[in-house]
Image: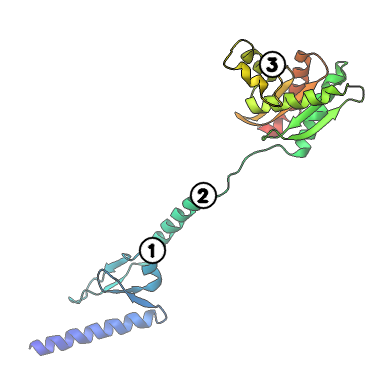
Amino acid sequence: MGGSIARVHCARTRRWRLTWEAAAPTTPRTSCASCKIRCSASLYSLAPRLCLFRPGHYGWGERRLMPHRLIALASIVVIALLSVRVSSQGLITQRNLSLPMAKTIAEATLAECKSKGFNTAAAVVDRSGQLLVLLRDDQATAQTLEMARRKAYTARMFRMTTNDFQKRTANDPTLAPQRDIADILALGGGVPIQVGTETIGGVGSSGSNQEMDEVCAKAGIAKVAELLK
């Protein structure tokens, strides 16, 4: 009696193995280290526990692969985790001024002061403080070029108008040394270029009085306001 049961059991086991191998004839197999079962080598390399007990099998401890839906879900999770890791270690994206936009700002700044009867210079720097555009009216004096550049640089570095910077550092001995930093100029006429609260550049105007220089610089930024949203 015992021998017949054993033969039936072996026959069933043999038929199940043949059926399983016929369904996936090219799938390589390896031995799971913890439970001595056979799983797909590719799946085991990703997740050695992605196996489930095979329902209906008789006592041999054999297991079968997870259903396709669970395998797909596990793959998605793995890919998502890898993507997060790569993005956290990859490049960053920053907004910056383009040359055409900087040129438009400088030209509008110069034109605003010209319409008020002043011959000025206008400068635009990018988010790193590097000069992009420097324009001078043909009747403006030579020093206005350097002053406009330094105003634009100051507005960018301190993320405020140079008029506000001048007031902030005037009577505070702890902030006054900021005026001594190279290329900083505490004279009105420099305005930061911002997208929301992010400063991406600065514009400076020189050649009129300090209040009018600031008005002209703001007019230059207003010319491209729709592009800064």
Answer left or right for 20 relative to 208. Answer: left
Q: Which residue is mark 3?
A: 163
Amino acid type of the residue tagged 1 in the rendering = Arg
Q: Tell me, yes or no, whether the two marked residues, 3 and 1, touch with CB atoms within 8 Å.
A: no
Which quadrant holds residue 1? bottom left
Q: Residue furthest top?
A: 171
Q: Are marks 2 and 3 in contact (CB under 8 Å)?
A: no
Badge 3: residue crowd in 10 Å (few <14, some 14–19, many ≥20): many
The image quarter containing residue 4 is: bottom left
Q: Earlier in the sequence, mark 2 or mark 1?
A: 1
Pick whichever, 186 or 25, lies toward us: 186
> Which of pointers 3 and 1 lies earlier in the amino acid sequence?
1
Please provide percent x and percent y for residue 119: 88, 20
Q: Which residue is mark 2?
A: 89
Q: Name the residue carrying label 1.
A: 69
User: What is the C-alpha distance between the residues marked 2 and 3?
Assistant: 40 Å
Above or below, comparing residue 104 to residue 45 in the picture: above
The answer to whether residue 217 is left or right of residue 68 is right
Q: Measure the C-alpha gap from mark 3 to mark 1.
A: 64 Å
